[in-house]
């Protein structure tokens, strides 16, 4: 029952993502960006805390829906911030550095989970994990309130001369203001009519079609290969370390060849494709090669997503158009994550051939 409940939980989060995209991006444009992000993180932490007091499944459904709603615009807000401080070329090779904190999150989370699973308190280990996670999130929201800049002009860590220089070079790169609090309907309509915007949304959908491999199926697949429940948390941490290493490699590759973003994205999907084919064709008794192929498959295509996420906003001129295209990209992201758990049919365990084949063609070939 636990895998089924976990998948339902992921579906509720992604439904929250869908609900939160458009109003969240609108508020992000109307409100001071740093204050908006801080408030969003604070609500995120509170909702995580409230998981500990939920006593019925219905209450957890509401909390997971709310969690997805507040989480929906955090990444777009940080993407907009990167666009305020760096030009288009810099955004492309800094994107993997920014995402080290995301792909590396399983490292501390894995060790924290591993330690909490040894607890013998009346409080369930997952509740302790929520307390730790929620506490760190609220602490981050407080730091964000005081230190996160609304724009370069308000950045405490820049001198007046540096602020002018940053604003000037970013304006030259994007051909638009660094921040615009007025919602421009013309740019909104232009973005919706631009086929490139829909291609980015489609790319987000196809890549996230396989994202349940990371967050829903990883531990189940690992344990099916013979790894213990406790050991699976350490495998998750090792996967996070592998993801961090890939981000560093991608950073230097993008910095060395900055003009070929599509080619970079293709190469990383080829690695995922190779991992998926290995899972299908390697004998089930060869556990170590299967585990290696799984780690390759689940970590490499994410680099393509990271490249696409920055490319989505850096390729659009006009603040409202960048926000709208970002929202469309995240909408595709949410739909992909909503569909992703459906391809893992329990009767197909442990090989899940249908899921792997569909991920190969939809996500990595697509």
Image (cartoon, rainbow, N blue to C red):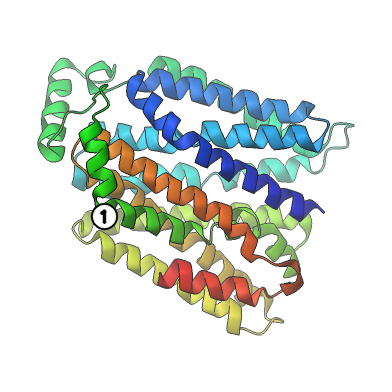
Q: Nearer the viewer, residue 269 or 118?
A: 269
Whether 18 is drawn above or below 144: the answer is: below
Left/right placement of residue 30 relative to residue 345 reads left
* Whether residue 140 can be seen here: no
Answer above or below: position of 129 versus 163.
below
- Mark 1, Cα crowd under 10 Å, few <14 / some 14-19 / many 20+, is some
Percent coordinates x, y for residue 230 in the rendering: 76, 53
Image check: 102 left or right of 259?
right
Q: Position of residue 245 (x, y in %)?
A: 44, 56
Q: Residue at x 55, y 79 (%)?
A: 278
Q: Where residue 287 appears, x then y in whole percent?
A: 68, 75
Please identify the quarter of the rendering in which residue 62 is found: top right
Q: Give whichever of 116, 70 is nearer the camera.
A: 70
The quarter of the rendered structure image containing the N terminus is bottom right
Q: Position of residue 59 (x, y in %)?
A: 75, 32
The answer to whether residue 82 is left or right of residue 289 is: left
Q: Which residue is mark 1?
A: 196
User: Relative to the observer, which residue lies in front, 113 or 124?
Assistant: 124
**Residue 248 seen in this snapshot:** yes
Quadrant in which residue 73 is drawn: top left
Q: Which quadrant does the C terminus fall into?
A: bottom left
Task: Tell me what residue is drawn at x 69 percent, y 26 percent.
Answer: 49
Residue sitting at x 45%, y 33%: 74
Please name the residue shown 70% across and 67% down the image: 345
Q: Nearer the viewer, residue 50 or 165?
A: 50
Figure label count: 1
Query: Secondary structure beneath disc 1?
Result: helix
365 relative to 57, above or below: below
């Amino acid at each position: 029952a636990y895998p089924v409940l976990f998948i339902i939980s992921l579906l509720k989060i992604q439904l929250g993502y869908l609900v939160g995209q458009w109003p969240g991006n609108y508020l992000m444009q109307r409100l001071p960006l740093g204050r908006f992000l801080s408030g969003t993180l604070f609500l995120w932490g509170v909702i995580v805390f409230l998981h500990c007091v939920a006593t019925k499944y219905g209450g957890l459904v509401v909390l997971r829906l709310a969690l997805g709603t507040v989480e929906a615009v955090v990444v777009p807000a940080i993407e907009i911030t990167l666009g305020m401080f760096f030009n288009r070329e810099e955004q492309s090779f800094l994107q993997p550095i920014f995402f080290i904190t995301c792909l590396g999150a399983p490292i501390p989370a894995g060790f924290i989970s591993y330690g909490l699973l040894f607890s013998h308190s009346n409080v369930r280990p997952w509740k302790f994990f929520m307390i730790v996670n929620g506490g760190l999130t609220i602490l981050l929201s407080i730091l964000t309130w005081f230190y996160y800049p609304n724009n370069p002009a308000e950045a405490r860590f820049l001198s007046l001369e540096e602020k002018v220089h940053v604003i000037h070079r970013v304006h030259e790169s994007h051909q638009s203001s660094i921040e615009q609090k007025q919602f421009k309907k013309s740019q909104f309509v232009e973005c919706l009519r631009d086929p490139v915007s829909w291609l980015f949304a489609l790319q987000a959908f196809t890549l996230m079609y396989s994202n349940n491999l990371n967050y829903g199926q990883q531990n189940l697949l690992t344990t099916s290969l013979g790894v213990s429940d406790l050991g699976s948390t350490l495998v998750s941490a090792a996967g996070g370390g592998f993801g961090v290493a890939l981000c560093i490699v991608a950073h230097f590759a993008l910095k060395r060849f900055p003009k070929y973003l599509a080619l970079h994205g293709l190469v990383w999907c080829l690695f995922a494709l190779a991992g998926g084919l290995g899972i299908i064709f390697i004998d089930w008794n060869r556990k170590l090669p299967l585990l290696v192929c799984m780690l390759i498959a689940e970590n490499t295509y994410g680099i393509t997503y990271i490249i696409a996420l920055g490319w989505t906003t850096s390729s659009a001129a006009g603040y409202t158009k960048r926000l709208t295209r970002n929202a469309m990209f995240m909408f595709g992201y949410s739909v992909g994550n909503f569909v992703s758990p459906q391809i893992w049919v329990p009767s197909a365990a442990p090989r899940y051939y249908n899921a792997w084949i569909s991920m190969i063609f939809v996500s990595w070939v697509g």
